[in-house]
Image (cartoon, grey):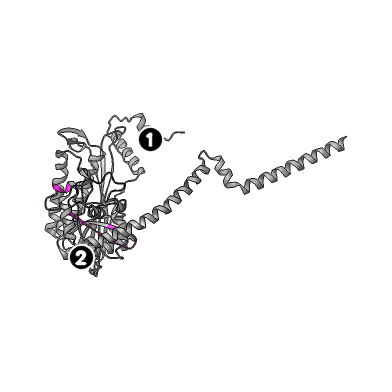
Amino acid sequence: MKVVRRANLNWKARFFYAFKVVLFIYFVTNLKRVIFSLTLLNFHLVKSQIDTMLGERKHFVDEFSEKIKLAQHELHNKSQNWEELSQKIEQSKTSWLLAGISSALDIRIPLSDRPVNYTAISSDGSQIFPDRHEVLPCYLINISSVVLNYGENGSANLSSDPVLFFKDEDRFAIWEGKKIPANSNIISHKRTLMEFERLLQLASENSDRENIISISDGTLILWSLEGSPADFKKVILEPFLKIMDEFKNRRVPIVGYISYPGSTDVVNALRLGLCPEKVSYCNQCPYTELPKLPCSPIEGLTDRNLFSSLLKEGEMSSVFRSSSKILKSYSDHHIYFFYLNIGAEVARVEIPKWVAEDPDILKLVHTLVYDQAKKGKGYPVVISESHEQAVVRGKDRNFFFDLVKESMVKADFNVSISRKGISKRVPGV
């Protein structure tokens, strides 16, 4: 009897061992399926939707290619009588931003030789917003300064200056006649103004240098002011325009560099050209009952898509005029723009009116912006360095408020922060 029981035990052990081996083999061969089944997300269903997306994407790519060809054709076609399109743009009323045209649309301007000596300056900003859960409702703005001198006396000067705002005139702003706490929108505008002030300061300090260019990260069009009340708009715009006056007086070009732009000003002008109406009024469009509007065949394209297919590396496009509403307040500093193929991408470069109208300065801007982008491996190196100097990270924010708290304690102030403020510092379980 004992021998039979041992045999039974051996048989069971061998069975369970074999079962485990089969289970292991199954698990290994179906690892991906097992992992999917263990997750909360139904990846089987997601995979089928991905396949559907890729199928539709292929159709989109084919359709996109046709749109590019049509846009190229329209660009060349309208260039022959660009004055006619320019007049139509001036007379029409649309809900789109339309590029102002003052020359043929398909011009491709080659790169000029770079001067031996030149200076690139830039400034960027970052901030720590006020927090009502902290010890004091103060805030900080960090402004960087970068000066890169190239040529015979090459050098680099990089620094940043943090500025603490705690007075009532800093912590509050006049908004529609009312005194309100400075929120993130107001502080961001203040920071932008400080960046341009620093740019002007750097231009002044390096006035003895030859071939100076000031490059700002992003647009020169303060479009976010469009929805602001007149009193606040005045606080930002008046000093900004004085800064622009100084740049013009010093003959130092100021440039806004926009990487991977999503603007459609030029494409919209071509769409207007597709409209059969002599003068277009979009709010009274007579073609709304048609399956497709006459202007829709190139809808969805960006200017970057169009000029990526036209410009060779180093080439810039024609110069166009922006129609942003805020520019009505820019006086003699209306903003123009062109597209530049820097190899890695096509960027939008914004310039004030006086730069657009000076062929020599415009040529210098073209050459130096391209050179800066190549030195930065696809992005202007002076802007990259400026950003690195200005950036305020999360740990810097916590240290800043800890420093404020510690200083207050040492000065015998009663210190308290909200429970929410404490919870931000101490992670939960």
First in sequence: mark 1 or mark 2? Answer: 2
Question: How far across and how far down the image is residue 415, in percent?
Answer: 30, 30
Cα separation, mark 1 vs mark 2, equals 52 Å
Image vertical order of residue 412 relative to residue 363, above or below: above
Name the one closer to the observer, 148 or 182.
182
Q: Which residue is mark 1?
A: 424
Secondary structure beneath label 2: helix
Q: Judge whether residue 105 can be spotted in this image.
A: no
Q: Which residue is mark 2?
A: 363
Inspect the image, locate mark 2, and give the three-letter code of the amino acid beneath it.
Lys
Q: Please provide the residue range marked out in magenta.
A: 326-347
Q: Residue at x 83, y 38 (%)?
A: 6
Farthest residue to the front: give it. Answer: 290
Sort mark 2 into few (<14), some (14-19) or many (20+) by Cα contacts within 10 Å.
some
Marking on residue 347: none
Q: Give the side of residue 53 with respect to residue 151, left or right.
A: right
- Tell me where residue 205 appears, x and y as whole percent: 17, 57
| Front residue (pair 4, 128) | 4
Judge by depth and name the residue closer to the eye, 135 or 124: 124
Quadrant of the image containing the N terminus: top right
Instruction: Locate residue 226, reporting x and y percent.
Output: 19, 43
Residue 94 in the magenta stretch? The answer is no
Q: Is residue 32 above or below residue 229?
A: below
